[in-house]
Every structure is written in structure tokens, then in C-alpha cells.
């Protein structure tokens, strides 16, 4: 009886952890994907609004991505503008906000690691339990995890992309305990470099990736179970 209860619990954990793993992995990948930054800088004419050449903006984007992965508390973005070297492009308020953003990104990384660990433990635990057919049940619940991912992503994705301005506002209100994210697009380089449209594009990419992966997990395990009769 205890083994059966543990088996059911591990299957539920696997199914619930899958959406978190897919979402956190996709966010991590998109945040660190250089072409997204270059695309956004060119699409939204960031060089015209900031007076900074695209090459320097690309360099700034790399420094931001490096900051998310290093141990520095405060960000430093060194660029050349109008022939002069700017030691740090961002002002005090922007620097403090980027510190908050870094903590948020680190939370995403932790979510990715924890969810991957839970899935691995859940699968390996199945081999230790004296219950026949554990592999087939694991595959079935992975399939359900894909279904949960599809449903949740469709719901949140439609809310986000259908009314992105409101979604973007509520995201900041929930994610940050201060108003440092309220920047002035006339003078703050951070918001000039990353306008709302940039985040819409990034969100759309994350939604599409997660939907595709959820769809694969939803159907692929069923085909595997049918092919191998497990």
C-alpha cells in the first residue's frame, strides 16, 4: 500500500514538474539568446532613440547577459557613445532595478534545476519500487505533464498576448516589491533599449516554444507506449 502511494505521488510530481521545467528552460534560453537582442535593437530603432550604434548596443546586450550569470551585485554596462567612452550607461535607479531583475532570473534558473531534479528523482524512484509497469505509467504521466503544459500555456499565453500592456503591468506589480521598474523613456537608457515591444516579442517566443514542447510531450509518449506496448 505504501509503495503504491509513493508511486502515485512520484507520478503526480513528474506531471506537475514538467510545465515548470519547460517554462523555466525556455525563459532561460530566450533571456540568453543573442539574436533576440540584435533583432530587438534593429526592429525598434534603438540606435536612433539612444544615439548608440548597433554594434555598441549588441555589446551592451552581451554585458547584460553576462551579468545575469556572474556574481556581481550591480551591473556595469560600458559603451561608446558619440566617440566617448561611458563607464556605465545606466543610472542609479536602473542599476538597482537590474539587481532585482537578476534575482528574478536567478529564481528562474533555480526553478529549472529543482523541476529537473524532481523529474529525475521521480523516474529513478520508479525503478526502486516493487510495482510492475512503472515505466509505462511514467510515460503516461509525462504525457499528462505535456497536456498540463499545453493547457496552462494556452491560458496564460492568450491572456498575455491578447492584452499585453495590462499583463506587463501586472507582471511588474507582482514580481517587484518596489517601483524602480517605472523608468522614464526620455532619459533612462534601460527602457530605451528594451521597449515594451521587445518584451512582447520575447513573451511570444517563450509561449510558442512551450506550446510546441508541450504538444510533443503530449503525443510522443502515447506513440512510444503504443509502439513498444508498454
Image (tube, helix red, strand yellow):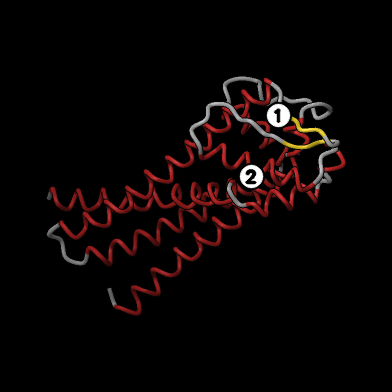
> Local crowd at mark 2 within 10 Å, few (<14), some, or many (≥20)?
some
Give above or below for 203 relative to 93: below
Give left or right: position of 48 versus 184: right
Residue 46 placement (x, y as % from top left): 81, 42
Q: Decide which of 2, 25 is in the foreground and name it.
A: 25
> Local crowd at mark 1 within 10 Å, few (<14), some, or many (≥20)?
few
Q: Decide which of 184, 76 is in the foreground and name it.
A: 76
Residue 182 placement (x, y as % from top left): 71, 24
Residue 154 placement (x, y as % from top left): 58, 52
Label drawn at residue 62: 2
Label drawn at residue 116: none
**Residue drawn 74% across the image and 25% down it:** 183
| Quadrant position of the C terminus in the picture | bottom left
Q: Which mark lies nearer to you, 2 or 1?
A: 1
Where disc 2 sits, the SS reads: helix
Task: Give the spatial CA distance, label 2 vs label 1.
Answer: 15 Å
Give above or below for 145 relative to 31: below
Where disc 1 sits, the SS reads: loop
Disc 1: which residue: 87
Q: Decide which of 96, 215 is in the foreground and name it.
A: 96
Amino acid at each position: 500500500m505504501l509503495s503504491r502511494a509513493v508511486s502515485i505521488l512520484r507520478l503526480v510530481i513528474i506531471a506537475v514538474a514538467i510545465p515548470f521545467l519547460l517554462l523555466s528552460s525556455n525563459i532561460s534560453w530566450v533571456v540568453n539568446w543573442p539574436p533576440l537582442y540584435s533583432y530587438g535593437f534593429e526592429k525598434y530603432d534603438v540606435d536612433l532613440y539612444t544615439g548608440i550604434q548597433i554594434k555598441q548596443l549588441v555589446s551592451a546586450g552581451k554585458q547584460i547577459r553576462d551579468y545575469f550569470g556572474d556574481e556581481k551585485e550591480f551591473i556595469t554596462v560600458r559603451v561608446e557613445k558619440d566617440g566617448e567612452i561611458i563607464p556605465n550607461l545606466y543610472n542609479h535607479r536602473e542599476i538597482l532595478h537590474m539587481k532585482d531583475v537578476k534575482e528574478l532570473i536567478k529564481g528562474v534558473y533555480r526553478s529549472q534545476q529543482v523541476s529537473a531534479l524532481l523529474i529525475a528523482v521521480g523516474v529513478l524512484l520508479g525503478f526502486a519500487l516493487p510495482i510492475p509497469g512503472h515505466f509505462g505509467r511514467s510515460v503516461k504521466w509525462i504525457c499528462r505533464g505535456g497536456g498540463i503544459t499545453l493547457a496552462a500555456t494556452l491560458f496564460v499565453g492568450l491572456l498575455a498576448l491578447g492584452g499585453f500592456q495590462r499583463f506587463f503591468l501586472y507582471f511588474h506589480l507582482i514580481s517587484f516589491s518596489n517601483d524602480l521598474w517605472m523608468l522614464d523613456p526620455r532619459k533612462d537608457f534601460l527602457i530605451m533599449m528594451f521597449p515594451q515591444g521587445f518584451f512582447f516579442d520575447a513573451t511570444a517566443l517563450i509561449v510558442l516554444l512551450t506550446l510546441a514542447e508541450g504538444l510533443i510531450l503530449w503525443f510522443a509518449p502515447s506513440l512510444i507506449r503504443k509502439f513498444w506496448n508498454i
